[in-house]
């Protein structure tokens, strides 16, 4: 009888290990991957990009600050946390022309700033 109980507990440990590995690959790993993608997206934000916030507000990034971003909307400029930005809207709606125009605009601003110094 003692031998039967020892085999049963080792089988139970193996099953718990398999369940933990399953949870890791089905739940924990995809969530970590999604968090990394969101962090990369927030770090790659550029001035001039059109974005949609989690609240549904559409606007253009006017400034990027250490603690957030300033979004320019039709009603004015508002400051939000970077985490409030849901997705970039520039490429989806305006195509490659808008992203090229935004890049040129930021390059022009940098050029003007260096000339002032």
Image (cartoon, helix red, strand yellow):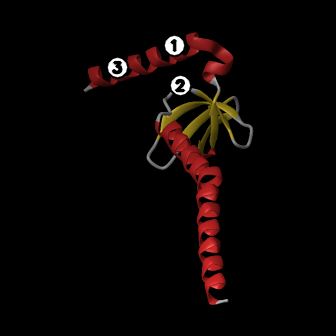
Numbered circle sitting on residue 101: 1
> Alpha carbon of mark 1 to alpha carbon of mark 3: how far?
16 Å
Q: Disc 3 marks which residue?
A: 112
Asked if disc 2 and disc 1 are in contact, CB closer than 8 Å, the reply is yes
> Alpha carbon of mark 2 to alpha carbon of mark 3: how far?
16 Å
Query: Which x, y percent locates residue 17?
Result: 58, 65
Mark 2 surroundings within 10 Å by alpha-carbon count, few (fewer than 14), some (14 through 19), many (20 or more):
many
Q: Which callout, 1 or 3, points at the residue further toward the start of the chain? A: 1
Q: Which callout, 2 or 1, points at the residue further toward the start of the chain? A: 2
Q: Residue at x 64, y 58 (%)?
A: 23
Q: Residue furthest bottom?
A: 2
> Alpha carbon of mark 2 to alpha carbon of mark 1: how far?
9 Å
Depth order, front residue of 74/11? 11
Query: Which x, y percent locates residue 47?
Result: 49, 29
Quarter-of-image position of residue 74: top right
Residue 81 seen from this side = no
Secondary structure state at the residue bearing disc 1: helix
Asked if disc 2 and disc 3 are in contact, CB closer than 8 Å, the reply is no
Q: Residue at x 28, y 23 (%)?
A: 114
Total numbered circles: 3
Nearer the observer: mark 2 or 3; the answer is 2
Depth order, front residue of 79/27? 27
Q: Which callout, 2 or 3, points at the residue further toward the start of the chain? A: 2
Nearer the observer: mark 1 or 3; the answer is 1
Q: Disc 2 marks which residue?
A: 48
Q: Is residue 109 above or below residue 44?
A: above
Secondary structure state at the residue bearing disc 2: loop
Query: Which x, y percent locates residue 93?
Result: 68, 18
């Amino acid at each position: 009888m003692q031998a039967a109980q020892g085999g049963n507990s080792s089988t139970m440990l193996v099953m718990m290990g398999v369940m933990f590995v399953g949870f890791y690959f089905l739940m924990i790993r995809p969530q970590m991957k999604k968090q990394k993608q969101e962090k990369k997206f927030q770090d790659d934000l550029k001035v001039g990009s059109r974005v949609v916030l989690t609240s549904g507000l559409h606007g253009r990034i006017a400034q990027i600050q250490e603690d957030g971003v300033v979004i320019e909307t039709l009603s004015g400029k508002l400051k939000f946390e970077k985490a409030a930005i849901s997705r970039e809207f520039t490429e989806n709606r305006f195509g490659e022309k808008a992203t090229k125009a935004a890049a040129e605009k930021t390059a022009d601003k940098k050029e003007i700033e260096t000339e002032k110094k």
